[in-house]
Amino acid sequence: MLATDDLRAEHQGILKMLAILRAIAAGLKPGAPLPRRQLGDILEFLRVFADKCHHGKEEDILSPALEQAGMPRQGGPIAVMLHEHELGRGHIRDMGAALEAGDPAAFAAAGLAYADLLTPHIAKENTVLFPMAERLLGAEALTAMQEDFERLEAERIGPGRHEAFHVLLDELSALYLS
Ligand SMILES: [Fe+2]
Ligand SMILES: [Fe+2]
């Protein structure tokens, strides 16, 4: 598998979680109790699956390879990507603080801001950054990169975790998207 196809597959999972997040945010009413367990699980998914694992692969493996192949780090798609990951971390922190404070409106606002940031971010990667990476690096390098991705995943999130997140996605989809 090409490393870019692995990232595209992870995007599918992240987009599904964003749809769940939007559905939950739309149903959060001021003063009503927060579905704490589900929101905690979603935050864990966003922190670990989306940020630590997926953004880790993009930041620590893909972008250095692109720089080495001549793509500038400043002022181009790499800089945009890094900046948007950083903005996303801010929204995740805000969601965490809102959950701690039991504040549905603040959680909904931060959750929607995150979904509104990540949706076009993912579209840009799929349609601009990854095709550029495929042209610049080629299939052989991207197939080898997939092995580095697997190592990063094993080191940072541990065995079996990826699968557990997919189970969570299925559970939450059945609850909120059907
Ligand atoms: Fe990204
Ligand atoms: Fe991505």
Image (cartoon, helix red, strand yellow):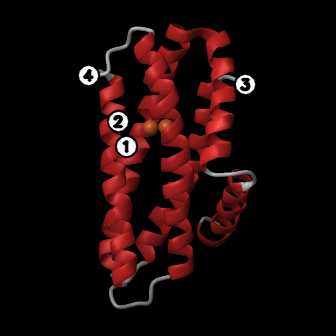
Q: Position of residue 75 (x, y in %)?
A: 24, 22
- Mark 4–mark 3 contact, CB under 8 Å? no
Q: Quadrant of residue 128?
A: top left
Q: State the residue in front, 177 or 53.
A: 53
Q: Which residue is mark 2?
A: 82
User: Is 36 placed left or right of 79 in the picture?
Assistant: right
Q: Position of residue 36 (x, y in %)?
A: 50, 81
Q: Position of residue 63 (x, y in %)?
A: 44, 25
Q: Which residue is mark 1?
A: 85
**Relative vertical location of residue 26 with respect to residue 62 in this rendering, above or below:** below
- Mark 1–mark 4 contact, CB under 8 Å? no
For the residues labelled 4 and 3, the Cα–Cα distance comes to 29 Å
The residue sitting at the left extreme is 75
User: Is 81 placed left or right of 58 in the picture?
Assistant: left
**Mark 3: is the Cβ under 8 angstroms from ligand 2?**
no
For the residues labelled 1 and 2, the Cα–Cα distance comes to 5 Å
State which tag comes first along the sequence, 1 or 4. 4
Q: Which residue is mark 4?
A: 74
Q: Amino acid at mark 1?
A: His
Q: Amino acid at mark 3?
A: Met
Q: Amino acid at mark 4?
A: Gln
Residue at horizontal 66%, vertical 58%? Answer: 165
Q: Secondary structure at mark 2?
A: helix
For the residues labelled 3 and 1, the Cα–Cα distance comes to 25 Å
Q: Which residue is mark 3?
A: 1
Tell me the quarter of the image containing the N terminus: top right
Tell me the quarter of the image containing the C terminus: bottom right
